[in-house]
Image (tube, helix red, strand yellow):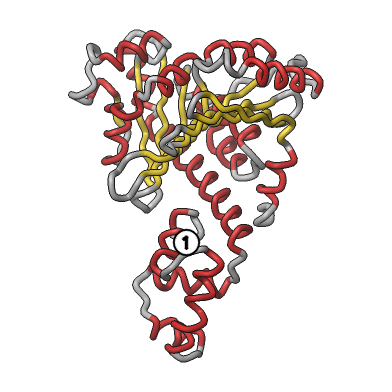
Amino acid sequence: MSMLATDRVAVEREEIVYEGVDRVGRDEVTLRLRRGGGAFFTLERQLVRAGGVKLTQVFPVGSDGALHDFASADPYGDSLQGSYMALRQRYLSEGGGRRTAVQRPVTPGDFLDQIGAMEHCRHEAELLPIAQTVTRALGAEQYIFSWLVLDEKSGDVTEHRYLVGCDPAWLNKYIDHVWYMNDPLLEYAKRNATPVLSSQLDLYSDSHWLAIEAAAHGFRNNLVCPVHAGTNSLLVMLQASNAEPREVGEGILWRNRRLLRALAGELLDWHLAGLRQQATSQFDLSEQEVKVLRMVHGGGTASNVAAVLDVSVKTVYGVVYPRINDKMGTSHINKAVATAVNCGLIE
């Protein structure tokens, strides 16, 4: 049974056991520690740059050593030392770092059962172990799942959210050097919807400076799986990698590309469901109002809406549309529709 609309939002807040906010120059960094199942936690590092771009990493913390590795790789580590120390103390006091039972290795044959369990995850602290287990079973030693919000006019990414299944030093360096501004793999994902090996992209050769940097952190062979959410402003990219010799490593990833793409699609669905639940709680729209938004999105006119609601066109313009705009903080019904699409309320 699926959770009620507001359940995931409430649970996510309840499971946060530490939160600290620091100013570093013109940037703002928020560190959150979130409890998962048993002794499993996630560290959420959110960086808001002066220009408004938001970059959030969600990193699995299964041991004190993993937490230390992430903090050591943080380019703002010295400025955030106090917050990291307080977070670590809370992690240990909450039972973090305890030895957990060794899980049975998952084979590709278990794939459907694993992704079927994803929809019941209450937050990313429960989702990450599944994503990690499945990607490893499919030949990816490291992965990054990127949830990206794009500016519809410029195409620039305004919000990044990463589920981190790789060396934390790599993603911290990638973000700190703003390499997402000219990443060929991301540019490919913006414009395509089929999996591709990085070696198949002419613009991303072994001699490309970013390829060299990635390989130094274990990203030697890369399979990119883009998944689009039916809108130009939402994009998901799964980058699955291993460090095997080229022919062997790429062969493994390519053979499993359909399963990895399915994993990316399931992760997208999970995130969209969360956005939908959050938007439902935030805007407090009735089922009828959501239906109106869906009709307008599908090309319906005020006359069509009036006929379905059994009211006059004047009432649609004077009451129905303004009430929706008031709830969503928009100035026009078309802007309300765009917001609803971006929030996953309608498709």
- The extreme front residue here reads 25
Instruction: Specify the quadrant of the image occupied by residue 84.
Output: top right
Q: Nearer the viewer, residue 106 or 283?
A: 283
Q: Position of residue 267 (x, y in %)?
A: 50, 40
The kind of residue tagged 1 is Ile
Q: Residue at x 58, y 25 (%)?
A: 59
Q: Is residue 130 above or below residue 220?
A: below
Residue 165: percent from the left, percent from the top?
A: 52, 23
Residue under pointer 1: 346
Residue at (43%, 21%) from the top-left corner?
176
**Relative to residue 230, is residue 40 depicted above or below?**
above
Question: Residue drawn 60% across and 45% down?
Answer: 119
Mark 1 is surrounded, within 10 Å at the Cα level, by few (under 14), some (14 to 19) or many (20 or more) other residues, namely some
Query: In the image, is 124 to the left or to the right of 164?
Result: right
Q: Considering the numbered disc 1 on the image, is that residue within a helix, a strand or a loop?
A: loop
Report whether 96 appears left or right of 173.
Answer: right
Q: Position of residue 137 (x, y in %)?
A: 51, 23
Q: Nearer the viewer, residue 129 or 29?
A: 29
**Quarter of image, res 254:** top left
Quadrant where the image shows the C terminus: bottom left
